[in-house]
Image (cartoon, rainbow, N blue to C red):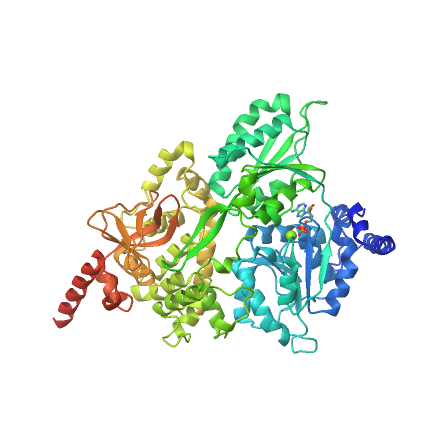
Amino acid sequence: MGGRRQRIDLGDDEASNKKQKADDDNAEAEAQTHNPWTGLPYSQKYYSILKKRFTLPVYQFKQELLKKVMANQCVVVEGETGSGKTTQIPQFLLEAGLASQGETCIACTQPRRVAATSIAARVADEMDVQLGQEVGYTIRFEDVSDPNRTVLKFVTDGMLLREAMHDSLLSRYSAIVLDECHERTLATDVIMGLLMEILPKRTKGSKHGELKVVVMSATLDAKKFQEYFNDAPLMKVPGRTFPVEVFFTAKAERNYVEAAVRTTLHIHQCEEPGDILVFLTGEAEIEQACEEIRKTAGSMARDHGELVVYPLYSSLPPEAQRKIFSAAPKAQVAGGPPGRKVVVSTNIAETSLTIDGIVYVVDPGFSKQKVYNPRIRVESLLVSPISRASARQRSGRAGRTRPGKCFRLYTEQSFHKDLQETTYPEILRSKMSNVVLTLKKLGIDDLVHFDFMDPPAPETLMRALELLNYLGALDDEGEMTELGYQMSELPLDPQLAKLILVSPDYGCSAEIVTIVAMLSVPQIFLRPREQAKAADEAKAQFTHADSDHLTLLRAFNEYNMVPERERKNWCWENFISERAMISANNVRNQIIGIMKRLDLAYVSSDIKGDGSFSSMDIRKALTAGMFMQVAYRQRSGEYLTVKDNQNVAIHPSSVVNNRQDWVIFEEFALTTKNFIRTVTSTNVDWLVELAPHYFDLENFPKCEAKGELEKAYLRMSKMCKR
Ligand code: ADP
Ligand code: MG
């Protein structure tokens, strides 16, 4: 125990004192026979994990950390990935008595859902308790915690922000551990700003007691965070890392997925034993790479050992996610070549989750990143080059257990010239409508003077205020309306929230809530590459030619009519993801719960009760919520977004053909082309009827759509006269 490195940083005496103290603590912990939380005897598994925990670098800093936390309201912790920050530090705070069952709780925030759920499960194991009892998690639409029992909760940063809407001083919490702060996600930045308001109100002796904050990260600009949190002290946990040899390619790679597969197989053939971590950008790419690696690896097994391949991305079922932690396969025959594990992952393995045993990293240099263009009001996820800081983090993953190698699939010149030093904080590349609505709800009116670590661009804030005003959430003075309050209760994008709120007026809230739930889960319709034709035929049964939204609705209704025990089969036969359906159903029930609270009528256009619906009412309701995302077909046959005049094409996955004049769309995807996805045909008369304040011709750019809108207004005024 005790890495060699630590002795370099500290005087020898101090280091050995520290080690002695840590050893004493550990011996004491090992002597405990009963779990203080449950009163039950500890299991065998508990002790075996405990031994491993003692070897984590943070253990030697436990006393120092607790001393700093006791003396300060806020502490910044910087420590190498894998040093034990996320799993251990919240437990240290618990042991120090910071939480008490049924009264106060410790929260640890995570930018990603997968990290929150997976770490919660790990920590529950470490504490020898059942997940959802003493240790739990809360992510959007999923709460696995118990207000009377949970003392440590892993939450996505977005969920903590939601909680603040109902508990503005976060009074339930005695300590908040903000993890992965270097990522600077939008929600983390907003929470930090919020904490700046809360901390002075939650000092020692205040009504809800003192709130402690621990700001953690692998590599952060510690100074910046320390200064922001009123000169908070810093605790540095030296990592136990081994040298990593970095290789670049001589020429730029044209296809990075293919290059990543090739490199992985090459490592398996030519390099010493040790597991491989490959970074790709998303589910489709990852599944494709896994398949290709498996295909070739099978024939190499006899000479080079077995190669098991695990994907890792957020929409993967939890059982599959856990597999990445299993050990590499043993040699198939005694004395034969040992097996190897390959994990092909999104950015999540960069710092959030540590996989032991990785010796080789394959880094193509890309990740999916949010970009926002306020001029055309478009936010997209775009595959973009990573930063140099990310590249260093990725290579660091290879040196956790012994010296490793990192293969960067780009040139050294590109690393120095093309990559940025760090990624811009998300707040500078996101739309802000959701955040602005939340902040307004929290009573923060002066957005311009809110203490953001990096303030968003004024144009982005303007756009958000404008959108909320068009939706009727804010009045012309920027004050929150009753509708705005109701919208903020729904954990949805403002447009979808509005859609839910207006749906009873159109007699179809039952259908709209289904559609919104289906939009909230990824990938309902599966389309495996080798069965694309069969999958398309299956989807055709649900197709509603006017609308992707109605196609989703139809699929859900059919699924719902299948008896429960036959659903698995039904999903399989129809190329529908059962897991997505189950979570859509769960989301649906939760939104219905909120609708009840808000006193919204649950009405269906299905009068016969046979799963049929009124396409017109639903499309009209959709238009009432989504009138700001409309495209019009030009005489040339091309679509142009209305008001922003962007050329777009209907995505090939859509069921809507190119013959519809007016369409509303859910998503604007920037890829090789500007695509609009999840589309429904609408009509111009509805647009002028439902949103005259938006389709205000006086301030309308010149375009073909304008002529059609003028005609529609004329028709409407004639109707009114009659
Ligand atoms: P940090 O937050 O400093 O990056 P963590 O606390 O996440 O570090 O992880 C510390 C160690 O805990 C890892 O190196 C790994 O050995 C172990 N660990 C974490 N999660 C799991 C898990 N789900 N299964 C097995 N081991 C895990
Ligand atoms: Mg961590």
The x and y percentages for residue 451 are 55, 70
* Picture layout, residue 709 above or below residue 290: below
Q: Residue furthest top?
A: 303
Q: At x 15% / y 66%, what residue is drawn? A: 714
Drawn side of residue 460 relative to residue 634, left or right: right
Q: Residue furthest left?
A: 722
Question: Which quadrant does the C terminus fall into?
Answer: bottom left
Drawn side of residue 342 relative to residue 496, left or right: right
* Total numbered badges shown on the rendered structure: 0
Q: Can you see residue 344?
A: yes
Q: Considering depth in this image, is 521 or 513 the residue closer to the camera?
A: 521
Q: Residue 262 lies in what quarter of the image?
A: top right
Q: At x 72% / y 23%, what residue is drawn? A: 334
The x and y percentages for residue 529 are 42, 34
* Picture layout, residue 540 above or below residue 504: above
* Picture layout, residue 46 above or below residue 211: above
Q: Residue 453 lies in what quarter of the image?
A: bottom right
The x and y percentages for residue 428 are 49, 59
Q: Considering depth in this image, is 405 or 146 the residue closer to the camera?
A: 405
The x and y percentages for residue 402 are 72, 38
Q: Residue 476 lies in what quarter of the image?
A: bottom left
Q: Can you see residue 97?
A: no
Drawn side of residue 170 relative to residue 371, left or right: right
Drawn side of residue 429 relative to residue 503, left or right: right
